[in-house]
């Protein structure tokens, strides 16, 4: 008997608390006919999401790494961006790590055999025997004792997907110091751009310091299928060689006859390993006298010691490497520590045919970090060489605001001058390289004049970070007159403060909050009354269900008796 | 990210029961230099402090902060000499499932104020380190002693330990080498607890789950079995009482 009362009370309560929007439209319209429309209830006021804890956009260059300088007799150009490469690394790889002072080497962090340069075989004033040693480094990986990633490298505020990169051979600690979880600056995404001279005798040793097998495949670079010892030299497990196992090493031989912008990447389970970051630009420069090359360009970007051939025709040179990332793949190394579990998840459970990219990087960073180190800095009436590779899973539609660029080379091969096209969207397929000539002549065609002009993949997802914009591979062509002394562009648009906060990319900050004084476009507050009502309806509906069950139970019990 | 529901439940309990001393042993002997605001604002180059002290770089590797004579402040004299020969090789990883890189020895016991000499033989073809953290910073820059051997080379160096009972971290700092097997501990005197995840010595704080494939199904089925068990027992008990 009491259960029936409970049932009635619950039914009544549920009807009373039920949000009116749950009623079918005809019922609501009929009710409005009888009693009129509901009374005005003031929607919740706009709220300001908590104050931002923003990073400093442009860290001060305390060590003077941005300055033009001469180290070991190497003239290193000024890096105008706010974060610059370590000039001691530049000097050491130009001279050869076996040819520089101990002080330079220690300041570079490289081992004496990282980039060895030997004899000048053609007598033209530069070394032609080059031996590069690369290790494999995991960034943002896991450990069995910390919840946070180890060897941290952020592509944007608070965003640290796991990566594997080829890295030059270094000594000492891999992090900034014992108290810091951050990777030191030389260990980063992307793998360094490698520069060699046409005809050089090149040895590249892969010292596999990683817990998975790897190889190097020199994509587009002239190399024999077998080396002098008859061993596989193509880096492909199914046709050329057993991969380099953890703790082992192999040396590849190259003597490239053709110059051009090429590519290198791991060829073990390449659909996964290439996307984890084991890829970089490989540039074969034309042979010239006294051609001391910057063998490694850490993190790609500006080439601070360009080759003789580039100096002949261009005022500046930039290496640009685009990569998109599926976070489901790159999180695997953070979710497991046992390599066997990582291998199972990566190579059997993860299905690249279902992949969808979340992060879009230029030279290992997404916006706004791209504005710290990957801007293309120019002056009026210059010619700038951009070497672009798309290391990602799908094409990019590279678009330059304020400029039309000329495609001079595809995949390292020159386009005949008569056939060259000048355009503002350049489609670059996976693994494709294009060399672009950017001319800053203000003629309304090549350039519309000085400014801060965006440079980005024009596909919508490419300018987001996991769907949040602005993000992704957004960068810019910036004229020096628009650059502050510290290398930060003088923009006249919105504040960058939200973009330098982790909360923004965690999707917690209303996108226009920073410049919406009216509050009309920020976040709406919560309707507490509606929430209470909803909870009430829930409680009564639950009671109603319980009462029903009890009634049925009793009925059955009575029947059994 | 890797914290599962079970971890949330278990970790605080483990920490409460056993963990605090263990975790504190992992901290360096001197309190870490406070990371001031300046450093937080300048996240890139300025915090890098790589030891350049008492060292010569060779293609075979390097020895950092070797010390055979300078005494820690709390030691009147060298109490004794102890020597270890340690091998680094992937072949030692086979003893500890789930690791890739290995060392022949993961635990070292030394007397307070003793002179410890380590010969580190690298049998792999890649670089390895035998690195100790937490030594007194007035003697060892960054509190660190490091033997770094290139593939196929060996390095020897010495250091003098202080007098207090402490457990020091020994590891290879090549990325992921510690996480994948090259972790050890050096106990001076009785030490002050064990570090986490030393192969053969201690468990990882975040141990991998090896039931992931059907773990949820097993849990759901066993919970259903538990419910059934209660009903059965209740039924039996009820009938017995009638």
Image (cartoon, coloured by chain):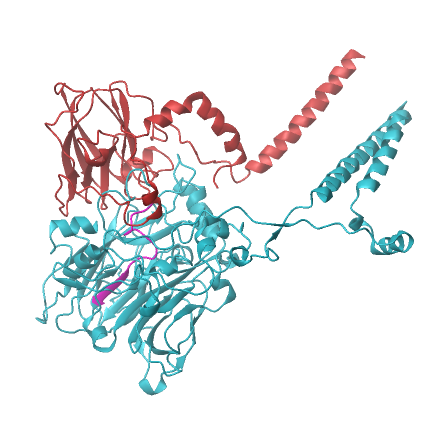
Chain colours: A cyan, B red
Q: Tell me if residue A35 is in the magenta stretch.
A: no
Magenta portion: prevailing SS class:
loop
Picture quarter with the N terminus of chain A = top right
Residue drawn at x 79%, y 38% is A541
Q: Tell me if residue A193 is in the magenta stretch.
A: yes
* Residue A286 in view: no
- Where does residue A491 sit, x and y in percent of width and height? 41, 64
Residue drawn at x 57%, y 49% is A48
Residue B104 versus residue A462 in the image, above or below: above
Q: B103 and B160: which one is in front?
A: B160
Instruction: Choose top left, top right, bottom left or bottom right for residue A13.
Output: top right
Residue drawn at x 73%, y 19% is B234
* Residue A508 in view: yes
- Where does residue A283 sit, x and y in percent of width and height? 27, 67
Residue farthest along the front direction in this orientation: A517
User: Relative to B99, is A255 on the left or the right?
Assistant: left
Magenta-drawn segment: A182-196
Picture quarter with the C terminus of chain A = top right
User: Relative to A296, is A502 on the left or the right?
Assistant: right
- Where does residue B143 sit, x and y in percent of width and height? 23, 33
């Amino acid at each position: 008997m009491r259960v029936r009362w409970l049932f009635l009370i619950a039914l009544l309560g549920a009807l009373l608390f039920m949000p009116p929007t749950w009623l079918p439209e005809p019922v609501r319209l009929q009710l409005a006919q009888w009693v009129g429309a509901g009374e005005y209830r003031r929607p919740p006021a706009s709220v300001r999401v908590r104050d931002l804890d923003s990073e400093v956009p442009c860290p001060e260059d305390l060590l003077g790494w941005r300055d033009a300088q001469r180290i070991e007799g190497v003239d290193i150009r000024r890096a105008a961006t706010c974060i610059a490469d370590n000039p001691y690394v530049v000097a050491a790889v130009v001279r050869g790590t076996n040819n520089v002072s101990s002080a330079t080497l220690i300041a570079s962090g490289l081992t004496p055999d990282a980039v060895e340069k030997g004899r000048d075989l053609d007598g033209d004033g530069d070394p032609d025997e080059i031996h590069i040693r690369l290790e494999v480094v995991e960034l943002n990986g896991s450990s069995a004792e910390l919840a946070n990633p180890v060897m941290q490298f952020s592509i944007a505020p608070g965003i640290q997907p796991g990566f594997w990169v080829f890295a030059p051979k270094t000594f000492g600690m891999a992090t900034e110091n014992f108290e810091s979880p951050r990777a030191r600056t030389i260990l980063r995404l992307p793998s360094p751009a490698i520069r060699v001279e046409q005809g050089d005798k090149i040895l590249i040793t892969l010292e596999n310091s990683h817990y998975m097998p790897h190889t190097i495949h020199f994509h587009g670079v002239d190399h024999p299928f077998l080396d002098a010892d008859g061993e596989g030299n193509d880096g492909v497990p199914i046709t050329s060689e057993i991969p380099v196992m953890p703790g082992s090493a192999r040396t590849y031989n190259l003597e490239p006859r053709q110059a051009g912008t090429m590519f290198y990447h791991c060829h073990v389970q390449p659909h996964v390993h290439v996307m984890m970051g084991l890829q970089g630009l490989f540039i074969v420069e034309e042979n010239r006298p006294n051609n001391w090359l910057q063998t490694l360009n850490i993190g790609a970007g500006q080439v601070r010691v360009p080759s003789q051939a580039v100096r002949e025709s261009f005022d500046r040179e930039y290496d640009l490497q685009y990569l998109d990332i599926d976070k489901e793949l790159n999180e695997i190394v953070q979710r497991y520590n046992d390599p066997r579990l990582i291998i199972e998840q990566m190579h059997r459970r993860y299905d690249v045919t279902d992949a969808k990219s979340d992060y879009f990087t230029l030279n290992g960073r997404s916006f706004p970090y791209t504005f710290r180190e990957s801007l293309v800095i120019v002056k009026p009436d210059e010619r700038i060489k951009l070497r672009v590779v798309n290391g990602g899973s799908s094409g990019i539609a590279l678009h330059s605001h304020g400029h039309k660029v000329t495609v001079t080379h595809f995949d390292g091969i020159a386009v005949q001058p008569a056939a060259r096209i000048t355009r503002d969207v350049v489609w670059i397929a996976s693994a494709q390289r294009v060399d672009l000539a950017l001319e800053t002549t203000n003629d309304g065609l090549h350039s519309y004049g000085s400014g801060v002009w965006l440079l980005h993949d024009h596909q919508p997802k490419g300018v987001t970070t996991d769907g949040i914009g602005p993000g992704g591979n957004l960068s810019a062509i910036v004229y020096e007159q628009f650059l502050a002394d510290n290398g930060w562009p003088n923009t006249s648009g919105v504040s960058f403060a939200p973009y330098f906060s982790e909360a923004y990319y965690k999707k917690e900050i209303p996108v226009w909050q920073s410049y919406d004084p009216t509050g009309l476009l920020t976040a709406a507050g919560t309707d507490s009354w509606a929430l209470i009502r909803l909870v009430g309806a829930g409680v009564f509906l639950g009671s109603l269900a319980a009462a029903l069950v009890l009634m049925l139970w009793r009925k059955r019990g009575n029947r059994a008796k | 990210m890797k914290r599962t529901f079970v971890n949330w439940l278990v970790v605080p309990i483990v920490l409460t029961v056993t963990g605090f001393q263990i975790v504190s042993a992992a901290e360096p002997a001197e309190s870490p230099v406070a990371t001031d605001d300046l450093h937080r604002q300048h996240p890139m180059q300025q915090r890098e402090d790589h030891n350049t002290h008492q060292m010569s770089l060779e293609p075979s590797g390097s020895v950092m902060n070797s010390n055979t004579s300078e005494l820690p402040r709390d030691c009147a004299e060298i109490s004794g000499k102890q020597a270890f020969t340690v091998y680094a090789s992937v072949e030692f990883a086979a003893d500890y499932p789930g690791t890739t890189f290995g060392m022949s020895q993961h635990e070292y016991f030394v007397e307070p104020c003793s002179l410890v000499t380590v010969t580190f033989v690298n049998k792999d073809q890649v670089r390895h380190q035998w690195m100790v953290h937490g030594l007194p910073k007035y003697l060892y820059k960054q509190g660190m002693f490091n033997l770094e051997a290139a593939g196929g080379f060996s390095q020897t160096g010495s250091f003098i330990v202080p007098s207090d009972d402490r457990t020091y971290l020994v590891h290879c700092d090549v990325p992921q080498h510690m996480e994948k097997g090259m972790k050890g501990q050096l106990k001076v005197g009785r030490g002050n607890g064990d570090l986490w995840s030393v192969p053969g010595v201690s468990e990882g704080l975040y141990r991998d789950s090896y039931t992931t494939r059907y773990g949820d199904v097993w849990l759901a089925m066993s919970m259903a079995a538990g419910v059934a068990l209660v009903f059965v027992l209740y039924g039996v008990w009820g009938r017995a009482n009638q």
